[in-house]
């Protein structure tokens, strides 16, 4: 009857674990390199989501609102909601700034029929 000796099993196990740990280290380094290469820029999707969750604006929503991004501490933003003619139609202007300079500007139009705006325009 033939079998593997304890020494052969230990050597085979050591080689297997060395190979597995080197593959894991290589994949970890590759993921970090890919993450560092991907561009990180702020966009308006974080700003639009709270606006589309309801069907109305109030007088407090109108005007300019500013804040910073949670995931992009070097960026700041401004949002301005303006009644656009009548019947619940609004224009929302977004400005994303980095270091005090405007990086991007966007506008969207939203129909919010349940809005009760007393502001005249």
Image (cartoon, rainbow, N blue to C red):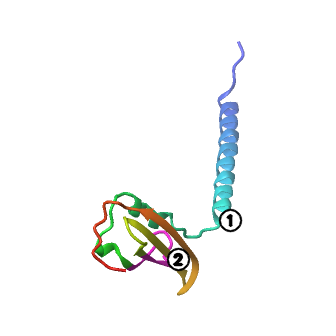
Q: Return the residue at label 1.
A: 37
Residue positioned most to the bottom: 100
Which quarter of the figure has residue 50? Answer: bottom left
Q: Which mark is residue 74?
A: none
Residue 80 is situated, as x and y percent measured from the top left of the image, at 43, 77
- The residue shown at (45%, 67%) is 47
Q: Quadrant of the N terminus?
A: top right
Residue 58 placement, left or right of 1:
left
Which element carries disc 2, helix, strand or loop?
Answer: strand
| Nearest the eye: 15 or 55 | 55
Residue 104 in magenta? Answer: no
- The residue shown at (69%, 47%) is 23
What secondary structure is the stretch in magenta mostly built from?
A: strand
Which element carries disc 1, helix, strand or loop?
Answer: helix
Which quarter of the figure has residue 20? Answer: top right
Q: Return the residue at label 2.
A: 96
Mark nearer the N terminus (2 vs 1): 1
Q: Which residue range is magenta in the image?
A: 64-80
Decide: is 72 above or below 56.
below
- The residue shown at (69%, 37%) is 11
Residue 73 in magenta? Answer: yes
- The residue shown at (68%, 27%) is 5
Q: CA distance from mark 2 to mark 1?
A: 22 Å
Residue 40 placement, left or right of 19:
left
Neighbour tally class for label 2: few under 14, some 14-19, many 20 plus, Cα within 10 Å: many
């Amino acid at each position: 009857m033939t079998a593997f000796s304890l020494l052969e099993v230990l050597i085979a196990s050591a080689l297997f674990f060395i190979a597995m740990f080197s593959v894991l280290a290589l994949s970890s380094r590759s993921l970090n390199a890919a993450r560092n290469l991907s561009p990180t820029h702020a966009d308006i999707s974080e700003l639009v989501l709270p606006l589309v969750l309801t069907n109305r604006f109030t007088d407090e929503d109108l005007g300019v609102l500013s804040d910073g991004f949670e995931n992009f501490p070097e960026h700041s933003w401004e949002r301005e909601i303006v009644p656009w003619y009548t019947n619940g139609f609004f224009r929302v202007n977004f400005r994303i700034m980095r270091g005090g300079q405007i990086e991007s500007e966007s506008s969207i139009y939203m129909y919010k029929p349940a809005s009760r705006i007393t502001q005249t325009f």
